[in-house]
């Protein structure tokens, strides 16, 4: 044998470049993340007053949305390693969850308070107004009556929107506590009445508008205050055995708590409940927060509607006292 019979070594094959995720997947995730950031920032800008003066839960939700969206954009600034079918499925589920979250954040945008409610938030010689993260309290500057009122706002409505409607009750001597509901949902503020009754004492009426009225009725059944005041609202079930005073104030043109709904609620309320229908008024005229989708068309002014609502509410407080 002649020559070198040892085979020349073959060079190792070049390592295969890691597979990256498809371009459409990366852009989909970036797009949802960017949408979340933009929507949260726009909502914060257009509803700034309601966000700042509302319960902190919605502000925290907006901040978390911006942070999560920003971190996702940073993580996906470069192509990422592709995974198997399971990884792709998880990422797509994350995309759909992100879209659902953005939709929820947008839906929870509060109806911001307008005039004259904003002016009614000022302290003067007749009423002292204090505001915390969870409450607005209106106290008469002079001697207070024994009957106080706790009020639950309607769904997603800025608590300040009811200030002009409730301030006259404080001017008449009644302490008024307006609840700032987490995310504007009254069911998340269940239990707000008991601490006020324990801390302040005296006689209490629990009240609410729309969904807030439904929750107020549940509170009335549980805590048994002296009275229940419903604005454009009705109870979720039978509370005809409730022994306190009850007043239902409704609007003839209400497109949400319709006259038919209010009429049907008579069977669920005590037989001596007082029903007052404000002719020509609509659902949104129980507060000052602008028009509301699905509502009717008013045929009376906001001032006229407010005067009638205040008169019916004072009648209940006077009867309770």
Image (tube, rainbow, N blue to C red):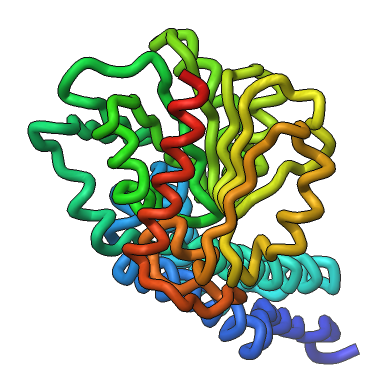
Residue 135 found in image quarter: top left
Residue furthest left as drawn: 125
Front in this rendered view, residue 154 or 225? 225
Horizontal side of residue 176 vs 233, given as left or right: left
Front in this rendered view, residue 84 or 145? 145
Position in image of residue 60 (x %, y %):
42, 48
Horizontal side of residue 149 vs 225, given as left or right: left
Residue 7 found in image quarter: bottom right
Q: Residue at x 46, y 40 (%)?
A: 313
Residue 248 found in image quarter: top right
Position in image of residue 170 (x %, y %):
29, 32
Residue furthest right as drawn: 1
Query: Where 114 sits versus 184, above or below?
Result: below
Query: Where 66 sits versus 299, above or below?
Result: above
Front in this rendered view, residue 272 or 38? 272
Whether residue 63 is visible, yes or no, is no
Query: Where 153 sits versus 198, above or below?
Result: below
Position in image of residue 59 (x %, y %):
39, 51
Q: Residue at x 28, y 25 (%)?
A: 173
Horizontal side of residue 161 vs 281, given as left or right: left
On the rendered image, what quadrant is the N terminus found in?
bottom right
Horizontal side of residue 167 vs 257, given as left or right: left
Q: Residue at x 18, y 53 (%)?
A: 119
Position in image of residue 285 (x %, y %):
44, 63
Q: Residue at x 62, y 89 (%)?
A: 23
Whether residue 133 is visible, yes or no, is yes
């Amino acid at each position: 044998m002649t020559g070198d019979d040892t085979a020349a070594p073959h060079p190792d094959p070049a390592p295969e470049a890691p597979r990256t995720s498809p371009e459409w997947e990366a852009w989909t995730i970036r797009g949802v993340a960017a949408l979340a950031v933009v929507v949260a920032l726009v909502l914060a800008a257009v509803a700034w007053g309601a966000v700042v003066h509302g319960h902190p839960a919605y502000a925290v939700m907006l901040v978390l949305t911006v942070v999560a969206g920003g971190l996702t954009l940073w993580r996906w600034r470069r192509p990422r390693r592709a995974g198997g079918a399971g990884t792709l499925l998880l990422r797509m589920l994350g995309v759909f969850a992100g879209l659902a979250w953005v939709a929820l954040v947008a839906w929870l945008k509060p109806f911001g308070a307008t005039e004259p409610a904003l002016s009614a938030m000022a302290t003067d010689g007749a009423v002292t107004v204090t505001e915390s993260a969870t409450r607005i309290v209106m106290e008469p500057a002079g001697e207070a009556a024994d009957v106080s009122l706790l009020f639950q706002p309607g769904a997603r409505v800025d608590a300040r929107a009811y200030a002009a409607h409730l301030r006259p009750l404080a001017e008449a001597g009644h302490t008024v506590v307006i609840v700032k509901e987490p995310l504007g949902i009254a069911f998340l503020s269940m239990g707000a009445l008991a601490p006020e009754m324990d801390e302040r004492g005296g006689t209490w009426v629990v009240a609410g508008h729309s969904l807030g009225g439904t929750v107020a009725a549940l509170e009335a059944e549980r805590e048994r205050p002296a009275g229940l005041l419903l604005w454009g609202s009705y109870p979720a079930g039978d509370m005809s055995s409730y022994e306190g005073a009850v007043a239902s104030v409704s609007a003839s043109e209400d497109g949400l708590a319709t006259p038919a709904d209010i009429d049907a609620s008579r069977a669920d309320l005590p037989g001596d409940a007082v029903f007052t229908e404000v002719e020509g008024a609509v659902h949104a005229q129980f507060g000052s927060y602008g028009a509301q989708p699905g509502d009717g068309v008013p045929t009376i002014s906001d001032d006229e509607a407010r005067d009638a609502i205040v008169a019916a509410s004072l009648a209940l407080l006077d009867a309770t006292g």
